[in-house]
Image (tube, rainbow, N blue to C red):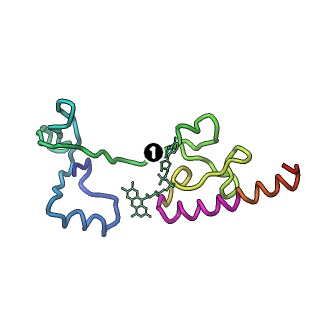
Amino acid sequence: MIHRRDELRASKIMQQRAKDNPKIEFLWNNVVSDIKGDNKVSTVLVKDIKRGGERSISAGGLFVAIGHEPNTSIFEGQLEMDDKKYVVLKDLTRTSVEGVFAAGDVHDHRYRQAVTAAGFGCMAAIDVERWLSERKRKTGK
Ligand SMILES: Cc1cc2nc3c(=O)[nH]c(=O)nc-3n(C[C@H](O)[C@H](O)[C@H](O)COP(=O)(O)OP(=O)(O)OC[C@H]3O[C@@H](n4cnc5c(N)ncnc54)[C@H](O)[C@@H]3O)c2cc1C
């Protein structure tokens, strides 16, 4: 595990699980500077950002997991978003567009958990159902 700082932000219990795993080696204060290979990864070059210097590690693959970027690009220009590209909710699960509701990691920059996403999913479903019923009552459609 290559990490640019000398500590992780993950929960203590998850950190401990990774640290206790004999198959995981931590490279602190390092960043990936290049990936080499012919059609598939064979070598990863890493740079020590504190001490300087670069070294290569043989690897058959590389998983990139850094930061949080909400997957909202398809809604750009359609739904109001904040400066970090999270969908802005107006009233619980309503978005800036009438009849469009949002739930989960697209709007939740604070908790970003499966259980909160599922809860918001339930809220959005109830709000959609109420919105449809109200529309039918008003317009007959
Ligand atoms: C490594 C990792 C570990 C985690 N561990 C935990 C944990 O221990 N406990 C916990 O509670 N949470 C955990 N989470 C967070 C949790 O996974 C998320 O908060 C949750 O999945 C958010 O649910 P969601 O429905 O909002 O989004 P997602 O689960 O991301 O669902 C979005 C869905 O939309 C689909 N989609 C995307 N774009 C399109 C498109 N253009 N058209 C159609 N479909 C599309 C995707 O394929 C996906 O199925 C973890 C997340 C990660 C990345």
Q: Decide: is 12 above or below 107.
A: below
Residue nearer the viewer, 28 or 51: 28
Q: Decide: is 55 above or below 133.
A: above
Number of other residues with Cα within 10 Å of mark 1, as a class: few under 14, some 14 to 19, many 20 or more: few
Q: Is residue 57 visible?
A: yes
Which x, y percent locates residue 58?
Answer: 11, 42
Describe the element under mark 1 as helix, strand or loop.
Answer: loop
User: Residue at 59% of width from left, 61% of height from top?
Assistant: 120
Quarter-of-image position of residue 8: bottom left
User: Residue at 77% of width from left, 54% of height from top?
Assistant: 132
With 67 as the anchor, is 27 left or right in this view? left
User: Residue at 64% of width from left, 42% of height from top?
Assistant: 80
With 70 as the anchor, is 48 left or right in this view? left
Which x, y percent locates residue 116?
Answer: 53, 64
Which x, y percent locates residue 118?
Answer: 54, 62
The residue carrying mark 1 has its beta carbon less than 8 Å from ligand 1: no
Instruction: Examine the structure image and report whether residue 82 is included in the region drawn in magenta.
Output: no
User: Residue at 74% of width from left, 46% of height from top?
Assistant: 98
Q: Which residue is mark 1?
A: 69
Magenta stretch: dominant secondary structure: helix
Q: Decide: is 14 above or below 103.
A: below
Considering every residue shown, the one lying at the far front of the view is 141
Quarter-of-image position of residue 82: top right
What's the magenta region?
A: 112-127
Q: Is residue 45 visible?
A: no
With 126 as the anchor, is 44 left or right in this view? left
Which x, y percent locates residue 57?
Answer: 12, 42
Instruction: Examine the structure image and report whether residue 117 is included in the region drawn in magenta.
Output: yes
Considering every residue shown, the one lying at the far top of the view is 38
Residue nearer the viewer, 30 or 126: 126
With 56 as the anchor, is 108 left or right in this view? right
Name the kind of residue labelled 1 in the image: Glu
